[in-house]
């Protein structure tokens, strides 16, 4: 049975005041295949995963399996030209969690917030916090795979990220 990711994504105009108190972890991920389907590997300080995603937009099919560090290390060189590194902050928002990603390296100063939902209906009822900027859920240029392949979108002009 496939599982689905239902997620909305927003640029962030200014960082929330409570950000320093939130849990965070450093992520590095690389893409092995992309197109309508994508295959990525990720190391998040605690675990190593291989993820396959299909589709685009609000709801996408997603399958994820844990891999070993040895498997990750064997595959990582294959992602050399298609990588993203970021710090992810986990911010509680009622029963939801905001994943606020602060990008590093060539993707700096991009800051993006993602929120996952149990249903499309729940996602439509969501009211973003004031520090969220423009919604980019349907903008393919802000998908991590696209960022890894192409770098920052030319239109990225988030005031908060410009001041970092």
Image: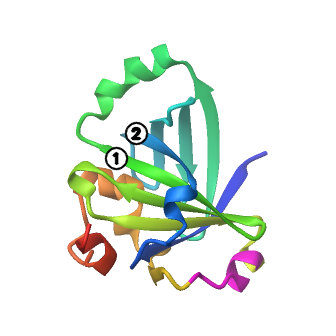
> Between disc 1 and disc 2, whose residue precedes?
2
Say if mark 1 contacts mark 2, CB within 8 Å: yes
How many labels were placed on the picture?
A: 2
Q: Which numbered circle lies on residue 112? A: none
| Label 1 SS | strand
**Is residue 156 placed above or below 38 in the rendered structure?**
below
**Is residue 49 placed above or below 95 in the rendered structure?**
above
Q: Which numbered circle lies on residue 84? A: 1
| Residue interval drawn in magenta | 122-129
| Horizontal side, residue 63 vs residue 136: left or right | right
Q: CA distance from mark 1 to mark 2?
A: 6 Å
Q: Position of residue 158 (x, y in %)?
A: 31, 78
- Name the image quarter holding residue 155: bottom left
- The residue at the point 50 percent across, 72 percent down is 16
Mark 2 = which residue?
Answer: 28
- The residue at the point 51 percent across, 63 percent down is 19
Looking at the rendering, in which quadrant would you find the C terminus?
A: bottom left
Q: Position of residue 103 (x, y in %)?
A: 34, 55
Looking at the rendering, in which quadrant would you find the N terminus?
A: top right
Which residue is more in the foreground, 116 or 3?
A: 116
């Amino acid at each position: 049975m496939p599982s689905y990711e239902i997620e909305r994504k927003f640029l962030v105009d200014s960082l929330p005041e409570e950000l320093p108190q939130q849990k965070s972890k450093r992520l590095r991920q690389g893409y092995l295949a992309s197109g309508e389907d994508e295959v990525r590997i990720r190391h998040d300080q605690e675990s190593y995963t291989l993820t396959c995603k299909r589709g685009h937009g609000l709801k996408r099919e997603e399958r994820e399996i844990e891999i070993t560090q040895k498997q990750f290390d064997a595959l990582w060189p294959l992602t050399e030209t298609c990588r993203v590194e970021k710090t992810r902050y986990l911010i509680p928002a009622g029963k939801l969690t905001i994943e606020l990603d602060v990008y590093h390296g060539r993707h700096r100063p991009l800051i993006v917030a993602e929120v996952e939902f149990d249903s499309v209906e729940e996602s439509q009822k969501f009211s973003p916090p004031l520090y969220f900027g423009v919604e980019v859920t349907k903008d393919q240029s802000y998908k991590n795979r696209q960022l890894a392949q192409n770098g920052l979108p030319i239109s990225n002009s988030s005031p908060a990220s410009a001041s970092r």
